[in-house]
Amino acid sequence: MEGLKMAIVNGYKQNENEKALDILNLDQLEAQAKEIIPTGGFGYIAGGSEDEWTLQANRRAFTHKQIVPRALTNIEKPELDTNVFGLPLKTPIFMVPAAAQGLAHAKGEVDTAKGLAAVGGLMAQSTYSSTSIADTASAGAGAPQFFQLYMSKDWEFNKSLLDEAKKAGVKGIILTVDATVDGYREADIVNNFQFPIPMANLTKYSEGDGQGKGIAEIYASAAQKIGPDDVARIADYTDLPVIVKGIESPEDALYAIGAGAAGIYVSNHGGRQLNGGPASFDVLADVARAVNGKVPIIFDSGVRRGSDVFKALASGADLVGIGRPVIYGLALGGAQGVQSVFEHLDHELEIIMQLAGTKTIADVKKAKLLNIHY
C-alpha cells in the first residue's frame, strides 16, 4: 500500500502509520491487512488449526439463532455502558489477549491499549505480548486491563509475571487452560514461521525472549499440566479475580468455579487449538445456564458483527471479545485504527439494540432469541 512508513526489525517490516479508518465492515479489514503484514506474521495471526473447520464454524454458529425485532418500544439512543467485575465500561466489547501484536504494527500492544482507552473499553494483554506489562498498562492511562497468563512450568517465573501485573494495576488475571500444547497450525508450518520480534515479558526471565522460535516451541516451555489447584494458587497469590479461559462445557465451568474461578471465559481460542470442536457460540448458552449467574461470563471466537455481540450477550455473556479484527485495525492505523474498529462495532450494536427494542445492555441480556432451522 502506498504512503506507508515502515520500520524494519530483524528483517521484519512493521507499519508505523497512525490513522483513523473508514470501515464498511470488519471482514474487509483482513484483506487490507494482508497487503501490509508480512506473510509469516499474517499467517500466524489469521490462521487456525488443521483444516480450520472450527475456525469457520465460529462464524457459521451465529446463524443458528435469530434476534426478534421489537416495535412500539418507545426507546431511542441505546446505551452501551456496562459494569463487569466492578469495572465501569463504555462498551461490552473488549480486546481479547492476543500475542505478539508487534507483528502487525511497530507500536504493538501500546497502540492497542491507547485505542481501547479512547473508547472506554477493557483490554486483556497476553503473556506473549511484544511490549511489557508495565508499558502496555501505562499506555492505557488508567483504563482497565486484565493480564492473561500462560502458566510456565517454573512457578517463580509465574510469580514474576503476576508481580509485575499487580504492580502495573491490572484488574484481573485470565488463566488460559486450552493451550497446554499448540494446535496443529498449518500456515505456520508452510511459512516456517518463527517470531522475528522478542516477547517483552519473557526477556527478563528463564524463558528466553521467544525470538527465533515458533509458537509450538514457546508452548513447550509452558505448563502441560494445569489443574484446579492452580486456579486457587493464582487467586491466593494475587488477590485478584481469576478468570479461566478456554471453557466449552458446563461441567468444566462448574469445576472451575469450584476451584475458585471468579469468571468463566467461553472460547475455543479462535479456532487455533482443538480443531473439530464446537463453535464457541454454540456452547455458550449451555455454559451460561450451568453457571446461573454465579460469576460473570466472558465470550469470544468468531465475533465480527454487532448482531454477533447482541446474540452473545442475549445467550449469557457479560463481556464479548474480538481479536483478529482489532489486530488488522492496528496494522492499518495503529491506535486510531484500533479505536475505529471498536467505534464501528459499537455503532452496529447500537443499531441492533434499537431495532430489537433494547435500551441497555441489561435489556439485551434479557432479550429473546429464536432458533429457526432454515
Image: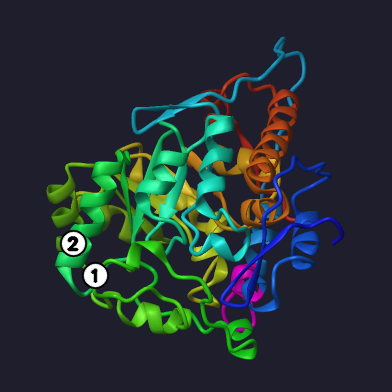
The residue labelled by disc 1 is 226
Q: Are marks 1 and 2 in contact (CB under 8 Å)?
A: yes
Residue 50 on the magenta segment: yes
Instruction: Identify whether 197 is placed above or below 307.
Output: below
Mark 2: few/some/many CA within 10 Å (<14, 14-19, 20+):
some
Mark 1: few/some/many CA within 10 Å (<14, 14-19, 20+):
some
Expressed as whole percent of the image width and height from the top left, the position of residue 172 reads 31, 43
Instruction: Identify whether 13 is placed above or below 252.
Output: below
Q: Residue at x 47, y 61 (%)?
A: 130
Q: As shown in the figure, which amino acid type bears the numbered disc 2?
A: Asp
Instruction: Identify whether 119 is placed above or below 146.
Output: above
Which quadrant would residue 345 be assigned to in this image?
A: top right
Q: Which residues are magenta?
A: 43-55
Q: Is residue 274 left or right of residue 205?
A: right
Expressed as whole percent of the image width and height from the top left, the position of residue 287 reads 41, 51
Q: Residue at x 21, y 75 (%)?
A: 153
Expressed as whole percent of the image width and height from the top left, the position of residue 233 reads 14, 56
Q: SS of the residue at dot 1?
A: loop
Residue 149 on the magenta segment: no
Cα gap from disc 1 to disc 2, whole angstroms: 6 Å
Near-viewer residue (209 or 296): 209
Q: Is residue 83 left or right of residue 304?
A: left
Expressed as whole percent of the image width and height from the top left, the position of residue 264 reads 36, 49
- In the picture, which quadrant includes the C terminus? bottom right
Q: Is residue 74 left or right of residue 254?
A: right
Q: SS of the residue at dot 2?
A: helix
Which quadrant would residue 40 be assigned to in this image?
A: bottom right
> Which mark identifies residue 230?
2
- In the picture, which quadrant includes the N terminus? bottom right
